Structure formats: C-alpha cells, structure tokens
Amino acid sequence: MRIYEKRTFTDMSDRSHLRVVWQEFKDRKVLKVALVYILMSWGVMQVGELLFTALQLPEGSYSLLVILVFLGFPMALVLAWAYEITPDGVRRDVVTDLVRQETAGGNPTLLSATSLAQDIPCIVILPFRDMTAEQDKSYFCEGLAEEIQNELCKLEKLNVVSRAHSAQFGREAIDISTVARELEVCAALEGSVRRSSGDVRVSVQLVDTTSGINTWPQSFDFQQEDDLEIQKEIAQRVAEFIKVSLVQHPQSGYLDWDPVAYDHFLRGMQFFRRRSATNTTYARQMFRKAIEQQACYGRAWAGLAYTYGFEYLNFNHSGNIRRKAVRASKRAMKLNSSSPEAHVARGIIKITHNKPNEADEAFDTAVAIDPENFEAWYFNAFNWARNGEWARAIRLFDRAAGCDEEDYQSVLLQSQLYVSLGDEAGSKRVLKTGIARANASLAQRPNDYRALNIGALAYLQIGEREIAQQWMSRSLQHAPQDAIIEYNAACFYALSGDLERSMACLRNCRDYGALDDEWLNNDSNLDAVRGLPDFETITGS
C-alpha cells in the first residue's frame, strides 16, 4: 500500500499526453480531412485563377477566394474533430469526446475515478472540525483523522491522499468541488466533533466528489474517557465500509450509485436486450445519458461497448465501430474492473475479433463475479454457437434462460442447435417453452417485433404455418431495414420452402447491415439455400 500523493497527477509526462492526442487525431480522421482539404483547396485556387481571369471578374476577387479557402481550413478541422460520418449520417462523436475530456483534464472526476489508468480509486480524509463550544477537541480530531488514515492505508487497491496535502484545506467548511479539482479524488471523508449533554458526538460522512452526494452518514456517541477506543472503533468501521463499497464491490457502492445515471443504465439494458437495430440505438442513447450524468460510471461505459460490439456483429462491419467498442470496453475496465459488465464487454469485443477462447475466459470472469449475469451467459452461448460448438452453446443458453425467466430468445435460439445435433425431441421441448415466453412478452409489449420475428420461426417448426406467416409479416412490416429481422426471415423462408424469398431477405440483410460469417456458416436453418448459385455471391461464403 502506498500513500497517494498529488504529484501522481502533476508528474504525468507531456509525451504521454501527446501520444494520446495524436491517436485521437488519427481516430477522428482529422489528418485525413486536413490533407484532402489542402489538395482540394489547391485545385480550387488553380481553377479559380483561370476562371476569374477568363470571366474578367473585379480585381481582388481571387484574393477573396484565397481568404475564404484559408478561413475554411480550421473550420473543417473542427468539424472533423467533433463529428463522424456514419451510415446513418453525420453524428457527434460522443465516445471520443468523453475520452478527450479525460486526456485534456477537462473532467477531473473522470481522472480521479480511474486514478490515471491505475484502476485504483482515490480518497482524501479531510481534517475533522472541532464544533465544541470550548474548542478543546482539536487533539481528538487530529488523532481520529490519523487513525482512519492508518486503517485505510492497509487496504489494497485504494489510494489515500497524504495528510500533508489534505491539511491544506484546514477545518473550516470545505467546498467538495474544490477538493475534487485540487486533489483529483473520487471520494472525500469529512466529519465533525460536538459535545452534547456531557457526551461527545462524532459525525462522519463519505462524499462522492462526482455527484456531491453524501453517503453513509454516521454518528458516534461516547464518553470523554473513551477517546482512544472510539478513535479505533470509528476508524475500523469507516475502513470496513470503504473496503466493501470502493474496493471489493465498487459497482454497488457510491461510485456507481448516482440515481439518475443508474436509471439511464437500466433503461439502456432494457432496450439492448430486445436485440434489434432500433433498440440498439435507443440503448446507446440511454448509456450516453448515463455517462453524461456521471462520467466515471463504469457500467454505463460497458453498456456502450455492448451496443458498438453488437452493431459490429450484426449491422455494420466498420473498423471505426469496432474501435469505438474497444475504447468503451477499456474505459469500463479501467473505471470498474470488478463489475461483471466490464468483463462481458471485453468478451463481446473478443467475439468481434474472432477469439472465442479469450471471449469465453472473459465471460467466465463475469459469472464468477455475478453468477446471475444474463448477458455473460447469453453472449458466451452466442460465442460458441457461431463457432459450431452446439452442445456447449445449448448449456450456456439454458443457463441464461434461468437467469431471466421472461427471456424468450435464449430459449428459442436453442431449437436450431438441437436440430443441428439431430435431437428433435430437445428442439420441440424448448420451442414449447420459448413460444409461451414470446407470447407473454407480446402481451406486455405488442410492438416487440423481435418476439414476433423469432416466434414465427418457432411456430413454423411446430407446424403452425398460418400464425407463423402472420407473425413474420408483422415483424417485417414494422421493423423495416433491420438486418437481424431480415436474417431471421431468410431462415424462415428457407425452412418453409420459399427459397427465392429467402435469398431476397439475405440480400436485404447484406444491404441493411452486415452478415456474421461465423454464425452464417454454422446455421442449419439455411441449409436449403446454401447450395444455390447466388448464395456464395450474396454472403461471400
């Protein structure tokens, strides 16, 4: 354990800053925009010189053109830095914006929560205030602060600001935002000592410097002769609370507790679990709002990584999308490496890089932290299903279904895996359960087009062709240009014998998004069209 000194922040090398900024310039394609702008400007000025002479425009027109070209250069660089061009149009680059805030020092609370890539939170014990009328408890205040400091220094994975630096704030009322800015900490412990009816009362509270929220307010009453014992007792209780909330389980402590950010996170997870292009966009918006509310919210960064990883696998094989997924995943891991979400995000990133064993390791770490984490089981099942490990995937999907008894996807997706294994009885068993869950979901959300989409496949497989056709038509009608919906429709029509329409849906899937080659190559639902001449042309398989 080391005592945390302020110089940890101020001694950062300028070279490290320059490397990060240079990488940001490359990621945002600022240099490319600059080069293109210079070449185009040179061409415009060459053509302008010829045209202005030929058209006999007033003297000074060419000079005006040159001025406009030069003025446009910094504007082009600013726009390239702030915005990105995506298949959906020009959008503000929120992820790299938030990362840039950390690099530039624009958000000290984000820096403090990561402890500058050390994965260690930082706390300061502020001088306790003597509120007694006699002002005769200053010795006790100093002793208590020192005792707490000693207890906290015994904790691993926690940085503690040295008393030499915390003492600069004195014992008067302290502005927490000033503390956060000056010491760059994510938590501050403050307290006071009062005398009441012959007894002495010590009040202690932990303050989240990110949100200013006071957590764990505690009061201790004792007799004056118990000074030394009460110091030890208070110090031990404070240390135990911080050990649990900040070190062992930060995802359940005040660091991840901002109620507004948490609400956005939960709403984001609700959208994300519906597994469609539109809902993935909605989920991303919720995770971004959570981050804007609390920049050091590691679980929200993990959720953001989920959406980019899922988009890369299903809608957009853009390298930029995968880089965003990687960046958000790394941020989640730095902010809260003990949260299962951070490891699930890392697992999804490994899937995008076609590294199933490393993905499996990440998901295993997540479930070791939280055995009931649905996403860990679900995406690990997806990981092995797309690699042809059907029996293994079934076990994992079944475990996911046990974590969320309302989820129909983890049940219905097992059906085709049982078919691939030649187990018709197993397929029928999960179809019955999955259909019941899909209907229950539709009773609550009639516009759950994911339920209609894969539910249609389920009804087709049990011979209910009429209702299967109705459900598939509704899903295609109300969720146009969704690559996942189109892919399942391709499977549906391949199984029902309409091979031409199945191929049309695969073309739409390719045009609207991206085909996951690994899943495609192991999907038995497409066996009927796999040998057709156009199949290889459409899928690239």
Image (cartoon, helix red, strand yellow):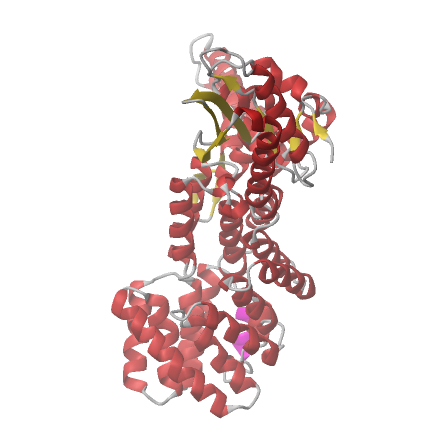
Would residue 14 be seen by someone viewing this image from the given angle? yes
Question: Is residue 533 covered in magenta?
Answer: yes
Residue 184 vs residue 265, the one in the foreground: 184
Vertical position of residue 12 compared to residue 29: above or below: above
Residue 43 in picture, x, y percent from top left? 57, 27
Residue 509 in picture, x, y percent from top left? 45, 65
Q: Quadrant of the N terminus?
A: top right
Residue 83 vs residue 378, the one in the foreground: 378
Does 121 sit left or right of 49 as displayed? Answer: right
Q: Quadrant of the C terminus?
A: bottom right
Number of marks in the image?
Answer: 0
Vertical position of residue 40 compared to residue 446: above or below: above
Which range is magenta? Answer: 532-539
Question: Is residue 55 covered in magenta?
Answer: no
Residue 468 vs residue 226, the one in the foreground: 226
Q: Which residue is found at the position 50% from the left and 25% from the top?
A: 191
**Res. 160 image quadrant:** top right
Residue 36 in picture, x, y percent from top left? 59, 32
Q: Which residue is found at the position 44% from the left and 14% from the top?
A: 56
